[in-house]
Image (cartoon, helix red, strand yellow):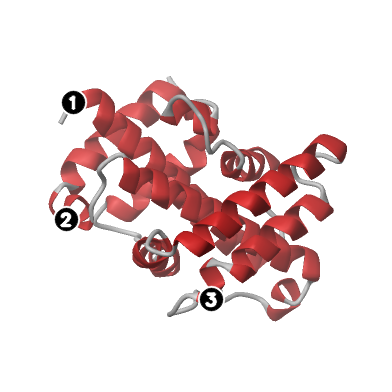
Amino acid sequence: MSAHVHLERVMALAGLHQATFLVQQIARHGRVDADPFNSSIASVFTLEAQSTEAVYGGWTRVATGLRTLAKQLGRRERDVEVSRYTVSLLFLERKLTRRGDLMDVIRDGIDAAGEQVEYFSLTHSNVLARLADIYTNTVSTLSPRIMVTGTPTHLNNPDNANKVRALLLAGMRSTVLWRQLGGSRLQLVFGRKHILAAVESCLEELEA
């Protein structure tokens, strides 16, 4: 495996962990930082990107995901909730990609949402509601459904619920990309140190 491909996989994993971390933040606190949120939502619309970096817009745009991934791969302070969301998406990806009908619904829905982006904006409530509908009609129909836990006041807010589902769709987009790059569960189990080393190296460069 080339170093370049390894870094592409790390970036996809960072994208996945950024999305699941942001899901947790909305569920718990009802808010997220705008930059990582925008980056995660933008990744949903880059289905025909020429490179993994083009999907996310560069390493800076997945810095939150890199920090989350570093924590999850370390021996201490691992967040069980983020792990649950992440593992669930990794499991559901295998079911989703075997369903050509659902993949078609996702592609068509993203095309329609893209037209809304041109009229409104990337994170306009109408766009997020459309992405949430895509998730509800595809990924959410698969078993087991991802159960998001948090503060009921925040979760019962329709706008927050749409943001959570849109982020889970973004997480699935990263999961599919990671698998397309040759990612596997065995790598996560036996290659943790290798992945963590790359993550820490990327963070050092970003924070230098």
Query: Residue 186, labelled with which disc?
Result: 2
> Is residue 22 visible from the viewing direction of this image?
no
Disc 1 to disc 2: CB gap under 8 Å: no
- Give whichever of discs 3 and 2 has the lower sequence position: 3
Residue 114, numbered label: none
Q: Quadrant of residue 125?
A: bottom right
Q: Amino acid at mark 3?
A: Thr
At 60% from the left edge and 64% from the top edge, which residue is drawn? 135
Query: What residue is disc 1 on?
Result: 2
Asked if residue 149 shows in the view, the reply is yes
Residue 57, above or below 183: above
Is 122 on the left-hand or right-hand side of 167? right
- Disc nearest the viewer among 3 and 2: 3
Residue at point 78% right, 41% down? Answer: 115
Residue sitting at x 73%, y 48%? 112
Instruction: Work out whether residue 77 or residue 37 is closer to the camera in this orientation and state it.
Output: 37
User: Circle 1 — which element?
Assistant: loop
**Which amino acid type corresponds to the residue marked 2 in the rendered image?**
Leu
| Amino acid type indicated by mark 1 | Ser
Alpha carbon of mark 3 to alpha carbon of mark 2: how far?
27 Å
Q: Which residue is mark 3?
A: 141
For marks 1 and 2, the one nearer the N-term is 1
Residue at x 30% of width, y 30% of height:
7
Element assignment for label 3: helix
* Dot 3 crowding, Cα within 10 Å, few <14, some 14–19, many 20+: few
x%, y% of residue 181? 30, 39
Mark 2 residue crowding within 10 angstroms, few (<14) / some (14–19) / many (20+): few
Q: Quick one: quadrant of the C terminus?
A: top left
Query: Residue 70: x, y in percent?
Result: 34, 45
Mark 1–mark 2 distance (CA, rounded to whole Å): 18 Å
